Image: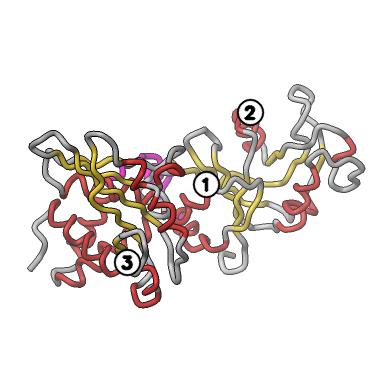
Amino acid sequence: MSNQRHYWGYRIDTNNIPFFESELRQGRLRQGWGYEEGQNLRNMTYDGGAKRNLAILNKVKKGDILLVPRLPTYEEVAIIEATEDFDIGYQFSIDPKLEDYGHIFPAKLIKQFVRNNENIAGKIRATMGNVSRFWNIDHCGEDIEAVIKFEDHALRDTISFENRFLNNISSAFNKSFDEDQYISLVYENMLHDFSNQEWEYALVEGLKKMLPHPITVERTGGILEYEHGTDILIRLPSLLGTEYLIAIQVKDYNGIVNHEPLKQLAKAEQYWNSEGNKLIDKILIITKSIREENLKLLENEYGIKIIFAKELKELIGKIADSYFIRPN
């Protein structure tokens, strides 16, 4: 079945999680934009947002897997299996109390997990950030099948980014006593476990461990990032009270990278240079891309240094040194 079925992301209205959870326990996966009888997908005479559910009706087949964020609780993700082809088992019945959610698809809950659990691959966590109502996640199929095989208790605990970093290092340490292979294993573990902005959190924790006090490391990505283009800020105090700053941007990219990340990080110059602060370096980290494919980035007009995959692997090795004595 795992070689034939497809995998989908599916969102619900998080204002009524208990309702969706109760319905799912009875084999009914509900969806919103079903508050008028004319929104029945079998004979739709009124859209009102219902038309976007047609993809769900037509694409999901018996045995397919759907991942539903915020179900059965706000902190969890439900793994759901379609018990019939959705276009065959679909029903329409508006909930009389909530006056919506008339679309009913045949499905059953087979597993649930906490998103930040150590056994959840970074690709899965990343795709759960998709804001679409329904989307294909076949690229996560192998990782989802691995999650399904875990015992329930192994999927319930959360784990901090620092501990995830430490677990990756420990796992590689136990598998290899060759220095180069060890560093490669740590890097490969991180590629599997971290994606997109998770790299920011992981590197913040690693750099905190590596850099001595009183140097501080903080994550600055978020709603103000468009003003300064900085994901991570390193602060180095001086004897005269001036604070020296290093601005870092992290991109989880592969292949050829355009100049847009450089333009973003260039904003750091004006933003962070103020009375009492002096920006002394700007660094762009690209997690998977290689130097040879991006030579044009190196000769940029902004004075930005670039860390590609090979250099990142070396940096991760130095971070690992701060946790353990690396094997010789």
Disc ID at residue 308: 3
Image quadrant in which the C terminus is located: bottom left
Number of numbered discs? 3
Q: Amino acid at mark 2?
A: Asn
Q: Residue 304: x and y, percent?
A: 32, 59
- Say if mark 1 contacts mark 2, CB within 8 Å: no
Q: Quadrant of residue 311?
A: bottom left
137 horizontally vs 53: left or right? left
Query: Viewer-proximal residue, 73 or 82?
Result: 73
At a point 84% along the width and 46% down the height, the residue shown is: 41
Q: Amino acid at mark 3?
A: Phe
Q: Amino acid at mark 1?
A: Gly
Is 164 placed above or below 28 here?
A: below
Q: Earlier in the sequence, mark 3 or mark 1?
A: 1
Magenta-tinted stretch = 149-163
Which label lies toward us, 1 or 2?
Answer: 1
At a point 37% along the width and 66% down the height, the residue shown is: 288
Q: Quadrant of residue 17?
A: top right
Q: Give the residue at the far bottom of this rendering.
A: 292
Query: Viewer-proximal residue, 196 or 305?
Result: 305
283 horizontally vs 94: left or right? left
Disc ID at residue 225: none
157 horizontally vs 326: left or right? right
Disc ID at residue 16: 2
